[in-house]
Image (cartoon, helix red, strand yellow):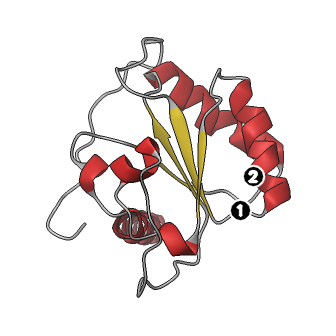
Amino acid sequence: MKGYSMAFEKIDHQNNNRPEGKTCLLVYGYDEISFKKIQDYAALYDIFEFVNVTPSTLGNTLQKLIDHTDKPTFGIERVDTQAIVLNAVSPKELNDFVRSFRTLGLPSPLFAVVTPLSINWPFHELLKDLLEERAMIANNRKFSKND
């Protein structure tokens, strides 16, 4: 969300301890067949709970989606992207999940992890923030190639 800068910290990719909370995936922008592929893939990581975020639920906070207390929201513009937001997974699971995702042959999504700050964000705001980050990273890569 605007006004929040993303904090990057060194992640211990060997840490297999899951944080407290409901382990699940919030999935957005994939069709039914792709969603099923993602479910099968996530099962390899012992992730069995999923939320299929739809254009009609984009205005809900991550917390409401995770708790399945979401309600239809109106007036939220559809965001044209695919995203997978992981909740309560270990750093090792996250690293392995993201690195091997391309083996599914699906479009590469925006990946994110629910944090104590982002859990209260509306899902569509998180998507917009992730898209801005992706654009900044792509722009920085473009400039560094020209150096």
Q: Nearer the viewer, residue 89 or 103?
A: 89
Identify the residue at image location x=61%, y=57%: 109
Residue in the picture at 73% in, 60% down? 107
**Of 69 and 51, which appears nearest the observer?**
69
> In the picture, which quadrant includes the C terminus?
bottom left
Under tag 1, what secondary structure?
A: loop
Amino acid type of the residue that numbered disc 2 sits on in the rendered structure: Phe
Q: Earlier in the sequence, mark 1 or mark 2?
A: 1
Query: In the image, is 39 to the left or to the right of 87?
Result: right
Say which quarter of the image contains residue 135: bottom left
Q: Position of residue 142 (x, y in %)?
A: 47, 71
Q: Which residue is depicted at the point 65% across and 23% down?
A: 45
Q: Percent position (x, y) of residue 32?
A: 80, 59
Q: Is residue 136 found left or right of 41 in the rendered image?
A: left
Identify residue type, mark 1.
Answer: Tyr
Q: Is residue 60 above or below residue 89?
A: below
The percent position of residue 118, horizontal first and vertical second, equals 28, 50
Q: Helix, strand or loop at disc 2?
A: helix
Which is nearer the eye, 135 or 3? 3
| Residue 35, label in figure | 2
The tag on residue 30 is 1
